[in-house]
Image: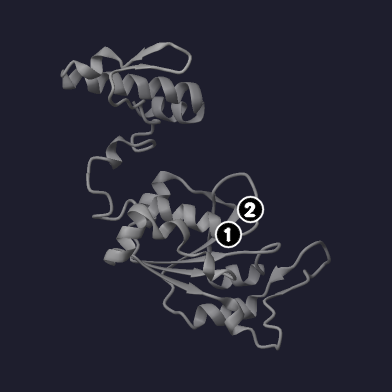
């Protein structure tokens, strides 16, 4: 996968994407990263990339002409995504869809956002991490890319990992335990793993895990639980 990031702060990348699984995949060439700094394509002495909004109001807006100059210099763009709170939510299903793309270009906004005409001209796909506002799109882009890159072939060694994660089957993931089987917590309480996990009975373990996933999902995400019940 080829990834291009249009950002006023290219030094923020690869950030945590250069570490752990994503970083190893970057070194192996499973995915590549290129940053695009719109300031290089500004035409005035001060390298201006933003201006006051028409109609008045607070803040500044990133200029369509400068952004377009930058994007045109880096064609092809592949699937073009703009990180914005007003976009469609990033879900596991969307991450799986994007992981199949050979090329992604992600535009990271700053200030009050981007001139709407630029988004229209490039048919930008607007994506949001949630109902909150960040200082810029860079952090959001990194999180989205982390969710995508880990789904690429050969990034995660165990191919069964994805099938057991939250959202794969419409449920949140079941609890996990490891050694020691008996552990005394700081409050003096002896905490043991569920007996079924040490039983060696794989069918019962699967049943227990599914039941736990259902219980956790119903308690924490009633929206997901209602969807899940309809599919059963």
The local secondary structure at tag 2 comes to loop
Q: Which mark is residue 210?
A: none
User: Compared with residue 137, is residue 186 higher up or lower down, i.e. above or below?
Assistant: above
Residue 123 visible within the image? no
Task: Tell whether 121 sits left or right of 91.
Answer: right
Which residue of the protein is positioned furthest toward the top in this rendering? 189
The C terminus, quarter of image:
top left
The N terminus, quarter of image:
bottom left
Task: Tell whether 11 sits left or right of 29.
Answer: right
What residue is drawn where x is 38% and y is 35%? 166
Task: Tell whether 117 sits left or right of 59.
Answer: left
The local secondary structure at tag 1 comes to helix
Colouring of the image? one colour
User: Compared with residue 102, is residue 213 higher up or lower down, i.e. above or below?
Assistant: above
Label 1: how many Cα within 10 Å (few below 14, some 14–19, many 20+): many
Which residue of the protein is positioned furthest toward the right in this rendering? 56
Identify residue for label 1. Answer: 137
Label 2: how many Cα within 10 Å (few below 14, some 14–19, many 20+): few
Along the line of sight, which residue is nearer the eye, 160 or 188? 188
Residue 49 occupies quadrant: bottom right
Q: Are marks 1 and 2 in contact (CB under 8 Å)?
A: yes
Residue 8 picture location, percent across and down: 59, 71
Residue 159 visible within the image? yes
Residue 13 picture location, percent across and down: 48, 65
What residue is drawn where x is 23% and y is 20%? 205
Residue 172 picture location, percent across and down: 40, 31
Residue 185 picture location, percent across and down: 42, 17
Task: Tell whether 102 sits left or right of 60.
Answer: left
Residue 3 occupies quadrant: bottom left
Identify residue for label 2. Answer: 134
Q: CA distance from mark 1 to mark 2?
A: 7 Å
User: Compared with residue 2, is residue 128 higher up or lower down, i.e. above or below?
Assistant: above
């Amino acid at each position: 996968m080829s990834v291009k990031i249009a950002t006023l702060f290219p030094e923020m990348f690869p950030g945590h994407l250069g570490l752990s699984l994503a970083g190893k995949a970057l070194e192996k060439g499973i995915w590549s990263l290129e940053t695009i700094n719109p300031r290089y394509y500004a035409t005035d002495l001060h390298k201006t990339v933003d201006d006051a909004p028409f109609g008045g109001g607070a803040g500044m807006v990133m200029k369509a002409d400068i952004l377009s100059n930058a994007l045109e210099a880096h064609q092809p763009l592949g699937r073009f995504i703009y990180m914005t709170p007003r976009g469609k939510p990033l879900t596991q299903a969307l991450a799986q869809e994007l992981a199949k793309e050979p090329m992604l270009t992600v535009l990271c906004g700053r200030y009050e956002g981007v001139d709407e005409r630029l988004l229209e001209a490039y048919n930008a796909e607007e994506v949001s991490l949630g109902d909150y506002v960040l200082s810029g799109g860079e952090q959001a882009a990194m999180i989205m890319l982390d969710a995508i890159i880990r789904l690429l072939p050969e990034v995660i060694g165990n191919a069964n990992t994805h099938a057991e994660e939250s959202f794969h089957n419409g449920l949140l993931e079941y609890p996990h335990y490891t050694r020691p089987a008996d552990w005394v917590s700081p409050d003096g309480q002896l905490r043991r793993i569920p007996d079924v996990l040490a039983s060696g009975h794989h069918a019962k373990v699967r049943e227990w895990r599914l039941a736990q996933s259902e219980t956790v999902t119903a308690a924490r995400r009633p929206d997901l639980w209602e969807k899940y019940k309809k599919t059963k």
